Image: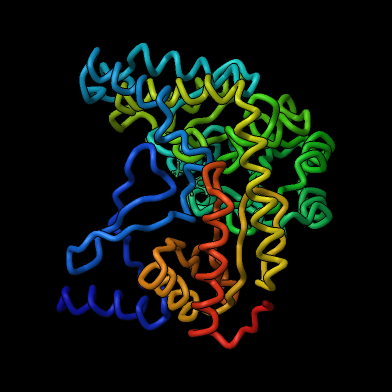
Amino acid sequence: MNYNEAFKTAVARVRAEGRYRVFADLLRTRGSFPRARYRVSTGEMRDVTVWCSNDYLAMGQSPCVVGAMKQALDDVGAGAGGTRNISGTTHYHVELERSLAELHEKESALLFTSGYIANQATLATLGKILPGLIIYSDALNHASMIEGVRQANCEKHVWRHNDVEHLEELLKAAPLDAPKVIALESVYSMDGDIGPLREVCDLADKYNAMTYLDEVHAVGLYGLRGAGVAEREGLLDRFDIIEGTLGKAFGVMGGYIAADAVICDAIRSWAPGFIFTTSLAPAIAAGARASVEFLKSANHLREAHQERAAALKARLTAEGFPLIESVTHIVPIHVGDPVLCKRLTDALLDEHGIYVQPINYPTVPKGTERMRLTPTPLHTDEMFDELVSALKAVYAKHARIRVAG
Ligand code: PMP
């Protein structure tokens, strides 16, 4: 076997489909986000405005978060020094888990090194703990949930996205006493729609199922204390396991679940993705805790965020851009072709200093390629003007799509 040829062929296939990823070498300067600098291939630095960050509230540059991280670094140094079981549980981890449990009104919380691992490890482990388990997974669930469900090694059914009638059909077909888990997201990050949370809880009661909710794109952003959509809808107590990230609205990194103590205890005891890995650096845990606590009483930020998203959607719609309808802070512009999507975003970056990541297959289905914009409270009207004129210019140059105005 010519190994290098095989690797080259694998990359060539991705390129041919127009979805080869080039990372922008970005230099975020604290205090100026969403303005940043990026390094082009010649080494030259250029100004750029970031329109695709998941640091939705710019907490990554917040004095309270950065201050807590610096303090922890000074106090205890860099790494955790071990897995949670072998010297890697510090007071910072314990306190952060306490904050997260309190946020979601649960008895316990359990940290993971990312939201991805939280989903994958927890769902996979449910399959080990609950013999005969059947998992019902929404068709648009994140890759980390799909991977977890696959590794759960149990019977699984994928219900059509947000289609509770389909979910009920599938639930009905199984014995009432079979253990079941229904897994869904609150905010779907690529379309910006919201799952049918209440209906799912009702079905879970009716068919004796557990509920698993990914609130990765909602924690910090929705609900009176930033606990997510379940808090906003008054449903916190109806979800058995709530999963979230510390890497998006909380601006740091890491993932977690919040649940009854007995559930966290079982996952902690059985999940390889929790047990066999060095725990988060104490400074990360300190920064995340500062962010979670700060955002519990930061409705002004949540409101500003929603206002910016609504204003951007209204502006782009008025200008004639084909938005995918979103009821959240996510603003996707439909493109429908991977090569065009890449061409538009390349031109935005190279010619206009506007950084938007193309979203292509496998992140979204083929034919639904899009540009996904994520305005923060720090995106100004002036930045909106720059964005709109850049979009008009790149569409005029690269696409035959007519844009009004
Ligand atoms: N769930 C969803 C819905 C996500 O979009 C993501 C990441 N984009 C994750 C989980 C993983 O979270 P993290 O980035 O913390 O690994």
Image-based side of 96 in relation to 233, left or right: left
**Where is residue 355 shown, x and y percent of the image?**
42, 61
- Residue at the spot 48% in from the left edge and 55% down from the top edge: 52
- Residue 223, percent across and down? 69, 30
Any part of residue 132 in sight? no
Question: Residue reaching furthest front?
Answer: 382
Residue at figure coordinates x 24%, y 12% from the top left: 75
**As displayed, is residue 269 above or below residue 359?**
above
Quarter of the figure with residue 236: top right
Residue at 21 percent of width and 19 percent of height: 77
267 is higher (above) or lower (below) than 163: above
Residue 72 x %, y %? 29, 17
Quadrant into which the C terminus falls: bottom right
How many labels sit on residues? 0
Q: Nearer the viewer, residue 146 or 308?
A: 308
32 horizontally vs 104: left or right: left
Residue 261 to residue 333: above or below: above
